Image (tube, rainbow, N blue to C red):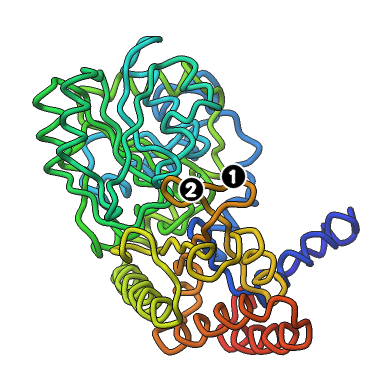
Amino acid sequence: MNYKNLKKCDPQVYKALMGELKRQQEGMELIASENYVSEAVLEALGSVFTNKYSEGYPGRRYYGGQEYTDLAETLAIERAKKLFGAEHVNVQPLSGAPANMIAYSAVLKPGDTVLGMDLSHGGHLTHGHPVTLSAKIYNFIRYKTDESGMIDYDELEKMAIKHKPKLILAGFSAYTRQLDYKRFQQIAKKVGAILMIDIAHIAGLIAGKAIPNPVPYFDIVTTTTHKTLRGPRGGMIMCKKEFAKAIDKSAFPGFQGGPHMNNIAAKAIAFGEALKPSFRKYAKQILKNAKVMEKELIKHGFKLMFEGTDNHMVLVDVYESKGVTGKEAEIALDKVGITLNKNMVPDDSRGPMDPSGIRIGVPAITTRGMKEKEIKIICKWIKDAIKNRNNEKLLKKIRKDVVKMCKKFPIYK
Ligand code: DSN
């Protein structure tokens, strides 16, 4: 990649950027929410669309000069509709957290009750964790997984009947099982709640038709565009027609100002890529890779939460199965160039900065072209690096092997 202008203009930022490029090229990226976008997406992000203010929506803007921004935003909307079978799409949310706030404020009044999944049981901060602004505005009640690690739908139904939520929220950032969309729909119908799902983690698996599509079942669907969907960092909201006006008004002028048009153009490109047959292959390969990872890690004596995975990630209790904390494991793996994140496990007895678990995802390495054979080797490296975390010589050797494998699957040449 050529950053010749940046190199001349700002050598300090250039140095940081080149360091990050090398880190991505030579590192094994196992953060479940990360991926590698195409160079076309990168080009759009760094394009002249970045200069343009476009408050409003295509055909209805508050600034002149919108013929090309309208074109790009309309392309993004139409492609997203086709990809997910959505009735209405808003591509302006700057990311997932704003998308959720926009959706809440479109349909809720301060004080309204929401049922959302508990963070330590796989939910997301923006699903009502007490430290968030949304939890200060709305009354979040958080449901959990049962002892086997599954969502207890009977308990969820009881909670819904008891608390009468205005909104029931499905979705997660560290849960590995397929959700029962129909059951969510039945429960919401029974108590007259609006039904929303945050598909940030699994949007690419849905778009690639590797897992079922929740869009027909849910009133509102929020997502990020940069995880399995492999687009630019950003958010998106899909909804049934009856919520379209409220969602659009809540996004702008309710919550945001000018949309980031460079980002929206990049979303259009990524959605175009996701409509191609090769994206389906990628999505299916993610599931295959994650299944191999599940089996291999169990074979190596790791304890997997939720008894395994149906999606792109696994959640591992390293504290119980290996006697190391999530933070210790993350540091040991960082040393060998394997990047992942420490993560709470359900009812974790440890704190979020040094929890019992690690979360491992395969989307980025699947994008690189790695398959079952490589996953088996990576799982062995994970086991060896954690076990030998104080053996600097062995860690260095694994680091070399990691770089060698990454070079066989090059990115951003
Ligand atoms: N930070 C994202 C993740 O890693 O899951 C969610 O916002």
| Structural crowding at the residue carrying mark 1, measured as other residues with C-alpha within 10 Å and reported as few (<14), some (14–19) or many (≥20) | few
x and y, in percent, of residue 372 in the image:
39, 85
x and y, in percent, of residue 280 in the image:
29, 69
- The alpha-carbon separation of the residues under discs 1 and 2 comes to 7 Å
Q: Circle 1 sits on which residue?
A: 351
For mark 2, give the secondary structure. loop
Where 83 falls versus 165 (above or below)? below
**Residue type, label 2:** Asp
Q: Is mark 1 within 8 Å of ligand 1?
A: no
Residue 250 picture quarter? top left
Q: Circle 2 sits on which residue?
A: 348
**Residue type, label 1:** Gly
Give the residue displayed 49% in from the left and 36% down from the top: 125
Give the residue displayed 85% in from the left and 62% down from the top: 15
Q: Considering the image in quadrants, where does the N terminus appear?
A: bottom right
Where 69 falls versus 348 (above or below)? above
For mark 1, give the secondary structure. loop
Q: Considering the image in quadrants, where does the C terminus appear?
A: bottom right
Q: Is residue 382 or residue 18 the one in the foreground?
A: 382
x and y, in percent, of residue 118 in the image:
39, 37
